[in-house]
């Protein structure tokens, strides 16, 4: 498992909703191996902040931008809950956060492609454990 995690870090930091707890378990995992832990964890709150930062200048523009960001955030969260619900299991929660991140992007996501990607990851992980 540590080797698989280590090989996946080329993409950048891993986002988590609990970097303290996840970091502790990862340190325990890597300490039990000869593999040095190079993985960096980042709080998913950084992704959420995309919606909170606004470039608007006037109070009216700021309010309008905040309302639009709130709508986008809620829509992304609702769709992520439908596509990849949280179950407090590592894979499901990781898929939820990944779907949420994709849905937060400014461009309109292709929901069918996202569904297929989630299903593909689930199949691959389940197949690896057989």
Image (cartoon, grey):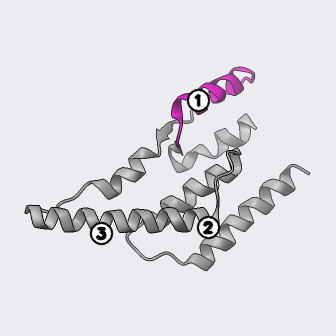
Q: Which residue is mark 1?
A: 21
Examine the image and state in which quarter residue 118 appears.
bottom right
Labelled disc at residue 82: 2
**Residue drawn where x is 55% and y is 54% of the image:** 97
Q: Position of residue 30 (x, y in %)?
A: 68, 26
Secondary structure predominantly adopted by residues drawn in magenta: helix
The image shows residue 13, relative to residue 59, as above or below, that is above
Of residues 126 and 51, the one drawn nearer to the viewer in this rendering = 51
Of residues 80 and 112, the one drawn nearer to the viewer in this rendering = 80
Q: Position of residue 90 (x, y in %)?
A: 69, 45
As measured in the structure, the alpha-carbon distance from the residue carrying label 2 to the one carrying label 3 is 21 Å
The kind of secondary structure element at disc 1 is helix
Q: Which residues are magenta?
A: 16-36
The crowding category of the residue bearing disc 2, from other C-alpha atoms within 10 Å (few below 14, some 14 to 19, many at least 20), is few
The kind of secondary structure element at disc 2 is helix
**Residue drawn where x is 62% and y is 50% of the image:** 94
Labelled disc at residue 68: 3
The crowding category of the residue bearing disc 3, from other C-alpha atoms within 10 Å (few below 14, some 14 to 19, many at least 20), is few
């Amino acid at each position: 498992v540590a080797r698989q995690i280590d090989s996946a870090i080329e993409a950048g930091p891993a986002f988590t909703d609990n970097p303290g707890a996840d970091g502790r378990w990862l340190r325990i995992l890597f300490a039990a191996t000869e593999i040095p832990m190079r993985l960096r964890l980042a709080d998913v709150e950084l992704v959420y902040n995309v919606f909170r930062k606004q470039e608007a200048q006037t109070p009216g523009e700021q309010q309008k931008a905040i309302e639009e960001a709130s709508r986008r955030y809620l829509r992304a969260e609702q769709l992520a809950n439908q596509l990849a619900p949280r179950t407090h299991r590592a894979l499901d929660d990781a898929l939820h956060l990944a779907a949420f991140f994709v849905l937060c992007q400014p461009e309109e996501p292709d929901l069918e492609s996202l569904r297929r990607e989630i299903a593909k990851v689930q199949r691959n992980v389940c197949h690896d454990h057989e």
